Amino acid sequence: MNYFGGIEAGGTKFVCVVTNEDNNIVAETRFPTTNPDETMSHVIQFFEQQNQVLPCPIASIGVACFGPIDPEPLSEKYGYITTTPKPGWRDTPITQPLRDAFHIPVAIDTDVNAAAVGEAAWGAAVGFDYFLYLTIGTGIGGGGIVNGRPLHGLIHPEMGHIRLPHDWQRDPYAGFCPFHGDCFEGLAAGPALFGRWGQPGDMLAPDHPAWELEAHYIALALQSLICTLSPKKIILGGGVMQQAHLFPMIRTQTLQLLNGYVQSPAILDDIENYIVPPGLGSRAGVMGAIALAQQVSHNV
Amino acid sequence: MNYFGGIEAGGTKFVCVVTNEDNNIVAETRFPTTNPDETMSHVIQFFEQQNQVLPCPIASIGVACFGPIDPEPLSEKYGYITTTPKPGWRDTPITQPLRDAFHIPVAIDTDVNAAAVGEAAWGAAVGFDYFLYLTIGTGIGGGGIVNGRPLHGLIHPEMGHIRLPHDWQRDPYAGFCPFHGDCFEGLAAGPALFGRWGQPGDMLAPDHPAWELEAHYIALALQSLICTLSPKKIILGGGVMQQAHLFPMIRTQTLQLLNGYVQSPAILDDIENYIVPPGLGSRAGVMGAIALAQQVSHNV
């Protein structure tokens, strides 16, 4: 009987869960992200309490972490949050305090890579070894699975920061990204909806022109991501994508932008199953952490 | 003693080579790409003649092929050129005629993926398992190596067709891509230089404003590709990149566009070794084909 721990470590809140051998969540807690010491103490306390009541202690822990992180096992700062602008969190070790406390394997990846791993295990990408998970919410990030493994590379992808065509006449909003102004995140994440229209996205009616423009930017990004990675499926999660009426608009505009160039039946004939919402819904991150925990447990 | 055959199958010309065990080219031919029957006959004839004079017959053949191709070994059309607009070449089998003629293993990949494999074997990416090769010439294409293997995915990447910001006031040229107008290829491949300035690139002086604009588009594309793939190195080949003065301009503008967001010493402190020309020069494609041949030979 194996129990696993999962942590969705976000910049605003932490979610910790324990799952049983049927991958059902048997315990859960969530608390605001304060400073690293206090936050990690809460995490450790939660799993210590669980270990006391479970039939056997948790076997391993996975962390789906806000970033940037160092995911390179051979690196000196493996398992650290590195250059985040979030006050107090720069150069913060995440995995080592958990290893020290529980003496079990601990895995870490970016929140979006973990969500992709979770979607591959139990969500919309079961059976896919090559796909893209994109979250569009307060920020925008992408996790890519290539040949069954998350993309890392030099550091890890930061797909929210690709550049897009920006028609300033149609949309004079300058974008809010402090680094790039009108990159994808700067133009299309939640704060851009608020900045452009003066209301949060979930206050805008489905027929508001905000959504056609939002779908336009997302489709521009998808066209570039399809041409760069050639994913076999694209999962769009995050708060903004809870506006379900965005999906048909995005599919239509993506097809228009590709303009028949990528001759694949998956895109041309079956776009409804090519660009899809997460199978795990808002659980993608934390269940991805569980999937990471199970992988690292099997590797030991 | 092992001899290998390599074919760089381009839309304009074919180059066929044979290498010896020291990876030196011992025979080479090149001829224009006409119709598939005639062209493939030339190829087969060349290798047949070589087999008669070599101490032993060639062990395997690799093809670095113009596309799109079907690189999926389990697919019905594996080894075909598929939806190319090139007259007469749509749905043309490339690997099977070679297997039928020589009864040896034959490998195929896109010209850019093959060039990347060649650069990893003997060029600028020796020791790198995660990098990007981009060719900027008559067209633009990208080959990505991730965890030591070329990116394929749904079909294969078409990195020349990502969308870029286009300041129409600065540059009223509409782009020449028949599918997307002002995508990366439409704005920055060789024909765009001619279309915009009325002269081919190699006639434009190094201080012509064409190059600052050209570097601008290439840097915009690199910024997006870095944010999507996080490559550990970027190799820029192709005819346009033979203008060596482009490299420092591209490096400077890429750093400006990233604006410190990707905190990696490889980029921030060592950009001269991060964005580089091919180590194999114009041999990248055909030596990539040889590398594919060697891999498929070892796999048998």
Image (cartoon, coloured by chain):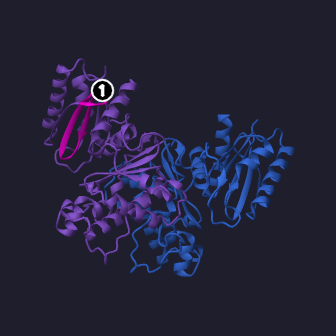
Chain colours: A purple, B blue
Q: Nearer the viewer, residue A229 or B2?
A: A229
The answer to whether one can see residue A79 in this image is: no
The amino acid type found where label 1 is placed reads: Ser
| Residue that badge 1 annotates | A60
* Residue under the point 34% across and 71% down: A166
Span colored in magenta: A3-25
Residue at the right extreme? B52
Say what secondary structure mark 1 lies in: strand
Crowding at mark 1 (Cα within 10 Å: few <14, some 14-19, many 20+)? many
Q: For the point 19% across and 33% down, which residue is it?
A: A28
For the N terminus of chain B, which image quadrant?
Answer: top right
User: Could you tell whether B198 is left or right of A163 in the image?
Assistant: right
**Secondary structure character of the magenta stretch overall:** strand
Q: Quadrant of residue A82?
A: top left
- In this view, the residue in front, A290 or A155, is A290
Q: Position of residue A188 (x, y in %)?
A: 29, 62
The single residue placed furthest to the top in the displayed view is: A55
Q: Nearer the viewer, residue A36 or A171?
A: A171
- Residue B24, relative to residue A28: is it above or below? below
Give the left or right position of residue A152, taking residue B146 as reference. Answer: left
Residue B143 placement (x, y as % from top left): 54, 53
Pointer 1 indicates a residue of which chain?
A: A
Residue A184 horizontal/vertical position (percent): 33, 61
Query: The C terminus of chain B appears in which quarter of the rendering?
Result: top right
Q: Does A4 lie within the magenta span?
A: yes
Image spot of residue B64 (x, y percent): 65, 52
Residue A35 appears in the figure = yes
Q: Residue at x 76, y 49 (%)?
A: B97
Taking the magenta stretch, the answer to whether it contains residue B223 is no
Is B77 or B29 nearer to us in this picture? B77
Q: Within the image, what quadrant is residue A288 found in?
A: top left
On screen, residue B214 versus residue A91, left or right, reads right
